[in-house]
Image: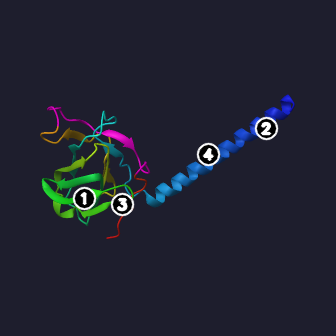
Amino acid sequence: MSGRAFLRFVAAALAGAAAAAGVVAWRRAALDRRFLATGPARWIWYAHDLPKPAPLAFTAWKDFRLAEAPPRPLHALLFVDREGTLELNGAVVGRVSRKPGDPFARFDATPYLRAGENRVRITAAHPTGAGGLLFALELPDGTQLGTDGTWRLEKAPGTGKGEPPRAAVVWGKPPLYPWGYPAVPTP
């Protein structure tokens, strides 16, 4: 193969790779539009690295403000691998137990929200310490409050060495192995 033929081959291969990457990006964007019901929410957890498999329990929370009480029904989506409890303003909204492949749990958040300051709190636990937490709450203005690096975390009482609260560790946005795009149950 001559030098010129080789360069044409390399250019064609690069063009083909760029086209394939474009198709993959387009497909991912289409899937996101179809399945990503959690808006800006990201998968979060307590830590990136686990020295050894061991049970882990922690609480994640986020404070937010609403200008007015919800004028229409608002829903919260929650996925905690393996177990979790959702609280809004100190009231237990629901409990979940999920594993990869399961759908979100969907809760009516309306009765628990109020004008002014609000707090969402999620207690999460996994028997080996390696799990994921994804939460999204639609807000009255049409935006979503979702899990991200601004959430605060602390280990459950009796499970840590008195570690201070910390920022959530962000794993990434859906789809993410092993959870993919959790399905949203119909109301």
Residue 164's tag is none
Are circles 1 and 2 on residues that touch, CB within 8 Å? no
- Gap between marks 3 and 1 measured at Cα: 11 Å
Which image quadrant is residue 161 in? top left
Q: Which residues are magenta?
A: 160-178
Identify the residue shown where x is 33% and y is 55%: 99
The quadrant in which the C terminus is found is: bottom left
Q: Along the polypeptide, which appears first: circle 2 or circle 4?
A: 2
Which residue extends farthest right?
2
Residue 97 coordinates in the image, percent (x, y): 26, 58
- Gap between marks 4 and 1 measured at Cα: 38 Å
- Gap between marks 2 and 3 measured at Cα: 46 Å
Identify the residue shown where x is 56% and y is 54%: 27
Closer to viewer: mark 4 or mark 1: 1
Are circles 4 and 1 on residues that touch, CB within 8 Å? no
Residue 81 coordinates in the image, percent (x, y): 30, 51
Dot 2 amino acid type: Phe
Are circles 4 and 3 on residues that touch, CB within 8 Å? no
Of residues 69 and 97, the one drawn nearer to the viewer in this rendering: 97
Crowd rating for badge 1 (residues with CA inside 10 Å; few <14, some 14–19, many 20+) = some
- Gap between marks 1 and 2 measured at Cα: 55 Å
Residue receiving disc 1: 96
Residue receiving disc 3: 102
Are circles 2 and 4 on residues that touch, CB within 8 Å? no
Say what secondary structure mark 4 lies in: helix
Residue receiving disc 2: 9
Residue 21's tag is 4
The quadrant in which the N terminus is found is: top right
Which image quadrant is residue 166 in? top left
Q: Along the polypeptide, which appears first: circle 4 or circle 3?
A: 4
Closer to viewer: mark 4 or mark 3: 3
